[in-house]
């Protein structure tokens, strides 16, 4: 999937940052660059860190955008206007639109209903 390529991109940026940092200061800690005199490397490092931050942000956003509501099956972010902001069930980790979450009887304390169903299933069977 695309997320895999993005994850690889982040690792590549991390390696580049470590290499630049190591080549400049002898330490893989990028913060060490800021403790050294000279502004050129600081600017370069800042740009590299900015690129990394952008990649991370893109990964986070794309994960959220590509995620679908477990209630209605529609994409989370594009339908947030009509279906409510994305919420995550604290019990099972599934994502829902806020309205879909409430429609299922979901609450922040009890989750989307997954726990309740598990808890009552053995009553039904028995
Ligand atoms: Zn929904
Ligand atoms: Zn749940």
Image (cartoon, rainbow, N blue to C red):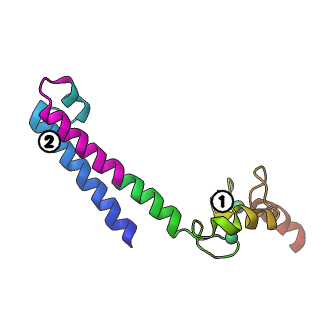
Quadrant housing residue 83: bottom right
Residue at image mark 2: 20
Q: On the rendered image, what quadrant is the C terminus found in?
A: bottom right
Looking at the picture, how far across and down is residue 40, in whole percent? 12, 34
Magenta stretch, residue numbers: 35-54
Residue 57 shows in this picture:
yes
Q: Where 31 sits versus 122, above or below? A: above
Quadrant housing residue 9: bottom left
Closer-to-camera residue (108/48): 48
Residue at image mark 1: 85
Closer-to-camera residue (10/78): 78
Q: Quadrant of ligand 2?
A: bottom right
For residue 60: magenta?
no
Between disc 2 and disc 1, the foreground one is 1
Looking at the picture, how far across and down is residue 55, in whole percent? 34, 55
Mark 2–mark 1 Cα distance, whole angstroms, equals 41 Å
Closer-to-camera residue (104/50): 50
* 46 relative position to 66: left or right: left
For residue 45: magenta?
yes
Residue at image location 75% in from the left, 64% down from the top:
99
Q: Residue furthest left?
A: 23
Q: Earlier in the sequence, mark 2 or mark 1?
A: 2
Q: On the rendered image, what quadrant is the N terminus found in?
A: bottom left
Looking at the picture, how far across and down is residue 90, in whole percent? 67, 53
Secondary structure at badge 1 equals: loop
Secondary structure at badge 2 equals: helix
Residue 126 shows in this picture:
no
């Amino acid at each position: 999937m695309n997320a895999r390529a993005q994850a690889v991109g982040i690792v590549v940026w991390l390696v580049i940052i470590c290499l630049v940092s190591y080549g400049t200061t002898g330490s893989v800690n990028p913060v060490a660059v800021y403790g050294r005199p000279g502004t050129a490397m600081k600017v370069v490092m800042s740009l590299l860190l900015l690129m990394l931050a952008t990649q991370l942000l893109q990964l986070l956003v794309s994960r959220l955008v590509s995620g679908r509501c477990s209630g209605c099956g529609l994409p989370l972010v594009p339908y947030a206007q009509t279906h409510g902001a994305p919420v995550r069930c604290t019990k099972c980790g599934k994502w829902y639109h806020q309205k879909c979450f409430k429609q299922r009887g979901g609450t922040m304390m009890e989750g989307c209903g997954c726990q309740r169903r598990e808890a009552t299933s053995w009553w039904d069977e028995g």
